[in-house]
Amino acid sequence: EADIYQTPRYLVIGTGKKITLECSQTMGHDKMYWYQQDPGMELHLIHYSYGVNSTEKGDLSSESTVSRIRTEHFPLTLESARPSHTSQYLCASSGGINEQFFGPGTRLTVL
Amino acid sequence: AQKITQTQPGMFVQEKEAVTLDCTYDTSDPSYGLFWYKQPSSGEMIFLIYQGSYDQQNATEGRYSLNFQKARKSANLVISASQLGDSAMYFCAMRPRSQGGKLIFGQGTELSVKP
């Protein structure tokens, strides 16, 4: 069982609020990822990091930003939430080519 | 273009029977990995099985096996002896070596197991 955690699991927030979705892993993995998933749809990569102080944007454009100051921690921030940001956000990490473990996800609803 | 295609939006299977979920992929990378994940209604992504493009044998993990046909670019998931708890969304994903660790996902197949 992979040790990757996300908080909060559910978040309902008003338009214009700043939010940070937390993701942490205890496996010492260098590579971490953020995916966005609308209900019943496929996952799309929005951010990734291959190590401390390294972050890149993914294939799907996102208004969110990420940081990687510590190996185990990869938070995602939305400066001003909008209803279009309503989605599920899944964090993942990998230590080798044949694995990628996901956290439980955060379901975000912006009113 | 790098792409994963799952053509079955929904599937039904009788409990205790086997079921095959289809997945085809497209990549020009000679080296790649193929993954299957299960996503129950709670939303988490559960890793099921992995197949490397150079692996000679089909991957198996308990009741899950991957029918890898490289020439046809297909990586179908076979679940044997279906259980009610297998009802979930199933996603096929590909990691081309040129993309680093990033996964490309298919649209998913919703499996329903009937008692």
Image (cartoon, rainbow, N blue to C red):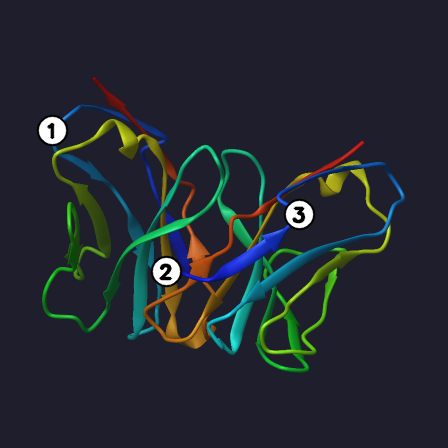
Q: Nearer the viewer, mark 3 or mark 1?
A: 3
Residue pointed to by mark 1: B17
Classify 10 Å Cα crowding around label 1: few (below 14), some (14-19), many (20 and above).
few
The amino acid at mark 2 is Met
Q: How far apart in space, not on screen, are marks 2 and 3 (Cα)?
A: 28 Å
Residue ID at (44%, 57%): B104
As helix, strand or loop, the secondary structure at mark 1 comes to loop
Which residue in the protein does label 2 denote? B94
Left or right of residue B22, residue A89 in this image = right
Out of A46 and B6, give the one closest to the viewer: A46
Residue B76 x %, y %: 21, 47
Marks 3/1 same chain: no
Residue at numbered disc 3: A8
Q: Residue at x 18, y 32 (%)?
A: B82
Location of residue A53 (image quadrant): bottom right
Q: In the image, residue A66 lies at what x, y percent?
A: 71, 66
